[in-house]
Image: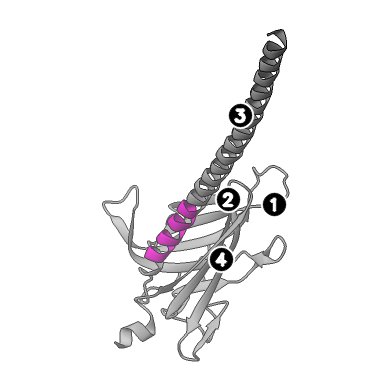
Amino acid sequence: MRRRGAEQRGFTLIEIVIALAILAALVTVTYNALNGLLRIKQYVDDRRVSQAIANSILLRMTRELQLADPETALLPPAQNLTERYPRNFNLSAEPAKIGQGQHGDSIKFMARGAGQYVLGTPGYSDVVQISYRVAEDSDQQSGPIQTYVLVREETPAIRPYERAYEKTMRFPVTAKLLELGFRFYDAANDRWVDNWGTNELVGLPVMVELNLAILTPDGRTERFITAVPLRGSQSQQQF
């Protein structure tokens, strides 16, 4: 009877060990599965954040570019208010390089219907000059990836020009910018070009391509690209 009881106790211990091993395996599998789900959720959340930023930028730029005015010349530079541009000088863009050689382009154009209320006047300016440029982030801490600030400026088309620039509204759109590039479709020569606003390329292009790269919260690069047809371009006016 004692021998049988010892055998029963030994068999029970084996069962416990096996049960604990199975439980440990189940816990490990459950932990790995849960950890994987959390990583997927974090990845999805990060993509959602980056896409929200990109969509906000692209939607704003698209809407404003479609308001580009082919009848109003760009304002004279703030550094030289006596300079005057011809009437068909409505959009100017210059390519530039930043960081490791990525695009940090700038663009400036006149927009009608954007509407800026001007303090001290009874109404608002229906036409404004809108510009986007890339600037270094002075608040950025040192890290493996350098990001830049996308700056938007809006100046009402009013006289005198000194007052117009005093009313300029300037604000950062995002501080997670890695790259901003533009291309312009030259319908007269059936080609895409990197700059606009030269002696040959005046007026409004038929289409503007926007190329945007931003840094996600987990340190990845997300790229977005879209093309915007301009309603006020010469080709559009012919139809």
Q: Secondary structure at mark 2?
A: loop
Q: CA distance from mark 1 to mark 3?
A: 44 Å
Residue at 38% of width from left, 84% of height from top? Answer: 234
Disc 4 marks which amino acid?
A: Ser
Q: Secondary structure at mark 4?
A: strand
Neighbour tally class for label 3: few under 14, some 14-19, many 20 plus, Cα within 10 Å: few
Disc 2 marks which amino acid?
A: Thr
Q: Provide residue 32's location: percent of width, then percent of height.
A: 61, 39
Q: Which quarter of the picture shows residue 239?
A: bottom left
Q: Nearer the viewer, residue 228 or 26?
A: 26
Disc 3 marks which amino acid?
A: Leu
Q: Which residue is mark 4?
A: 106
Which tag, 2 or 3, sits closer to the chain's start? 3
Q: Nearer the viewer, mark 4 or mark 3?
A: 3
Vertical side of 185 occupied by 11: above or below: above
Neighbour tally class for label 2: few under 14, some 14-19, many 20 plus, Cα within 10 Å: many
Q: Is residue 206 visible?
A: yes
Instruction: Report the disc number at residue 216.
Output: 2
Left/right of residue 17 with respect to residue 177 in the rendered view = right
Vertical side of 215 occupied by 111: above or below: below
Q: Secondary structure at mark 3?
A: helix
Q: Secondary structure at mark 1?
A: loop
Residue at 67% of width from left, 11% of height from top? Answer: 5
Which tag, 2 or 4, sits closer to the chain's start? 4
Residue at 37% of width from left, 64% of height from top? Answer: 63
Q: Nearer the viewer, mark 1 or mark 3?
A: 3
Q: CA distance from mark 1 to mark 4?
A: 21 Å
Q: Which residue is mark 3?
A: 23
